Image: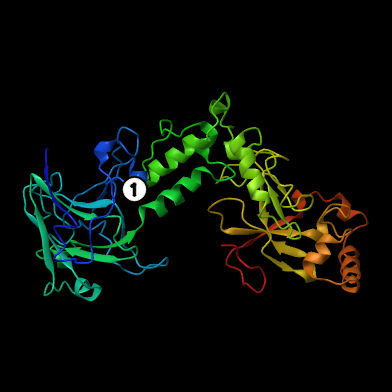
Amino acid sequence: MVRFFNTISALALSSLLPYMVSGECKDPALGISITQGTWSETGVNATWIPGRLDGNNINTQNPSWTIPEGTWTYPHGQSSDSGPIYRTLYTCSKLTFCNPEGVPDAEADASGRQLLDQFSEQDIWEIPTKEEFDACDFTNAALIGTTSATSCVEIEKDDLTPEGELFFYASKENCEAGQKIAAAVTDYEYNVAQCGAIAMHIPGTDRIRTCDCDFQKKPFSERYHGLCALAYQEACYNVMQPGDCCEEGTCLSKLETFDNQMGIDHELSRRETCDDNIPGMCYNMDAVATDMSGNGSTDCCSQTCSTCGSETASGATFRICTSNTPSNMTATCGRISRYAMDDVVCDFSKCAEDSHWGTGGDAVWMYMGLQSGAQSGAQSGAQSGAPSGAQSEESGAASLSTVLGFLSAGVFAALL
């Protein structure tokens, strides 16, 4: 179906929203990516389920504005374990409302309400406060526009829309039936930076390992905005090192190796922030892990921040310790994947005594803040419960244990 858009611009709404003036969002006709500030679409219904992919294999936005059918709802600013739920509106985006593509005459939700179809006219009102929105009170609401079978309504949020600002939209006729949405503005540049950073993670992502920056092997069908997908894709291309490793799934990014200028610059810059008086876990020196797999090698004993990097071993990354327990010579030292729920705990009493962080040297005692007398006592206590030579036989990998991230901060502090 061909639709003609009635665009409600920021300037057209200036009488309703006097603080808004024209921002610096760019015309897509210029051929510039939406990651650089051209206008993008945000469907009022998020992305399609199942996904509808564009030419870049990225899921597209669903602008359907209708009564929820019982298995889903628009975000209403309701509370959840992670906070209030709002639809994210990026600056330089257009929140788009269209009639649904078609609803059979016999289809109704669980309460028997007939769902709106593609031939109806549907109103969009802006409600000024959350309290009025919750109550479906339209006393102070302003009519934004009306959709039809051939036209949609777009509401622009330009680059000067304040980040964090909340907006509330509803159908007056069907507000009580749930046809209303609460939205919060986020700066598009922040999203670009966050999603691009995923491609530059060490260890690298599975798409880096398989050279799938173009999403041809695995489409980007997740319910993320295309802005995030393109930001990831552009960063992915920038660091990908394709070759025979693509089919094997073993490619490393430029940031994970010390044989290219980007990798060298990254590693030298990283070292400038190191404090080698603080131990940590040197992760993935065997270069087998991805950002999510958690199966890389671990070493709490032999490396410092300065030595645990791509010059020593491609793919290696240092997870600094963030809290310690001197009484048992342990420390909390990071997590091994982006979504890990467990903290890694390094047990330095199990390191080989002559290793850098072993109890035979000074480094670990200084980090624990123990004086020589306490050091001697701790060493004796650690050795008394283990067979002779047990410490020196333990490998760096064996010096690890994990604790759940929700354990008391008095025992192990969670790394956020």
Instruction: Give the quadrant of the N terminus.
Output: top left
Q: Choose between 333 and 166: the one closer to the eye.
A: 166
| Residue 123 in view (yes/no) | no
What is the three-letter code of the residue carrying label 1?
Answer: His
Name the residue at 16% across, 71% down.
Answer: 136
For mark 1, give the secondary structure: loop
x and y, in percent, of residue 252 in the image: 59, 35
Q: Quadrant of residue 372?
A: bottom right
Instruction: Give the quadrant of the C terminus.
Output: bottom right
x and y, in percent, of residue 265 in the image: 62, 41
| Residue 2 in view (yes/no) | yes
User: Label 1: few (<14), some or many (≥20) within 10 Å?
Assistant: many
Instruction: Identify residue for label 1.
Output: 225
x and y, in percent, of residue 4 in the image: 10, 43
Total labels: the figure holds 1
Of all residues, the one furthest to the top in this rendering is 244
Q: Choose between 287 and 239: the one closer to the eye.
A: 239
x and y, in percent, of residue 114 in the image: 10, 56
Name the residue at 48% across, 38% down.
Answer: 236
Q: Quadrant of residue 273?
A: bottom right
- Colour scheme in the image? rainbow
Name the residue at 70% across, 57% down.
Answer: 401
243 up-or-down from 143: above or below: above
Name the residue at 78% across, 68% down.
Answer: 368
Of all residues, the one furthest to the right in this rendering is 388
In the image: residue 348, left or right of residue 13: right
In the image: residue 179, left or right of residue 200: left
